[in-house]
Amino acid sequence: MPALYDSIGAGYETLRRPDPRIASRLHAALGPARTVLNVGAGTGNYEPAERAVLAVEPAARMIQRRPPGSAPVVQATAAALPFAEGTFDAALAVLTVHHWPDPLAGLREVRRVTRGRIVILTFDPASRPWLTDYLPGLAALDEAQMPPLEVYRTALGTVRVEPLLTPHDCVDGFLHAYWRRPHAYLDPRIRSGSSSFHALKDVDAGLGRLKADLDSGDWQGRYAHLTGLEEYDAGYRLLVAEPSGNPPDH
């Protein structure tokens, strides 16, 4: 079966650049680990340069788009990692678990090959950022795609969950990165950087309402409370799982 990003990866390396503030949170969460497995690595965003990273990515197209000097990469899936038990100090998975055909199996594999901390950036499917007011299909998609927290706990044990706030000028173009820049969602190039827009069947009506509200000023009035915020809880969550017997730091 072709990997999803073999078909939708065009422009990913320019639209989905790592945001340094998010990178700082992710790298800090990895703790003192020296060897890191990056699962569902894509073009290599958020791989810490100062550590020994090995990437795993199923999509050949994404592997080809990794920039020169990136960490070495193995083409494989999360559910079948070609490594021995406890190979890595830590593991990283950034906005990828919802794309895995079997998240529970994949998370168990990540736990098997990781002797220390596992850091995952995901999305809370119960969140309702303002974009879902115009595209309610996004909420249904999130509920269908995003594994609930219990899946992570079943596979990984005790998991610490922290909100990861999105900066208003976030340079990583994931779905809700443009929460204070609503006109961006009218640009098909910007939308192409998010797999959610590829999964939705029809966005024209919702985007038409958004454009009309932006033109009339209704959006600005309805969401005036957002315009002064520097960062926003759009539903992204940082999950940190320690090996069994080691409770997360606080």
Image: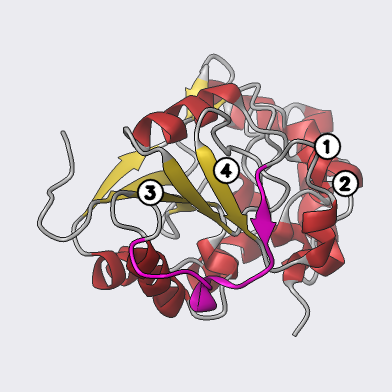
Write down the residue under mark 2. 11
Alpha carbons under labels 4 and 1: distance apart: 25 Å
Number of residue marks: 4
Rendering coords of residue 212 (x, y %): 83, 40
Lower position in the chain sequence, tag 4 or tag 1: 1
Quick check: is 75 in the magenta stretch?
yes
Camera-nearest residue between 40 and 185: 40
Q: Secondary structure at mark 3?
A: strand
Toward the viewer: 204 or 13? 13
Q: What distance separates the C-alpha of mark 4 from that of mark 3? A: 35 Å
Q: Amino acid at mark 1?
A: Thr
Q: Which residues are magenta?
A: 71-86
**Residue at image mark 1:** 14
**How far is disc 3 from disc 2 in space, using C-alphas?**
29 Å
- The part of the image, by quadrant, that contains residue 73 is bottom right
Closer to the N terminus: mark 4 or mark 3?
A: 3
Q: CA distance from mark 4 to mark 2?
A: 26 Å
Q: Tag 2, which secondary structure?
A: loop
Of badges 4 and 2, the one in the foreground is 2
Mark pair 1, 3: CA separation: 27 Å
Q: Which residue is mark 4?
A: 130
- The label nearer to you, 1 versus 3, is 3
Which of discs 4 and 3 lies nearer the camera? The answer is 3
Q: Position of residue 125 (x, y in %)?
A: 45, 60
Residue that carries the numbered disc 3 in the rendered image: 90
The residue type indicated by label 3 comes to Ala
Task: Specify few, some or many for label 2: CA neighbours under 10 Å numbering under 14, 14-19, or 20 or more.
Answer: few
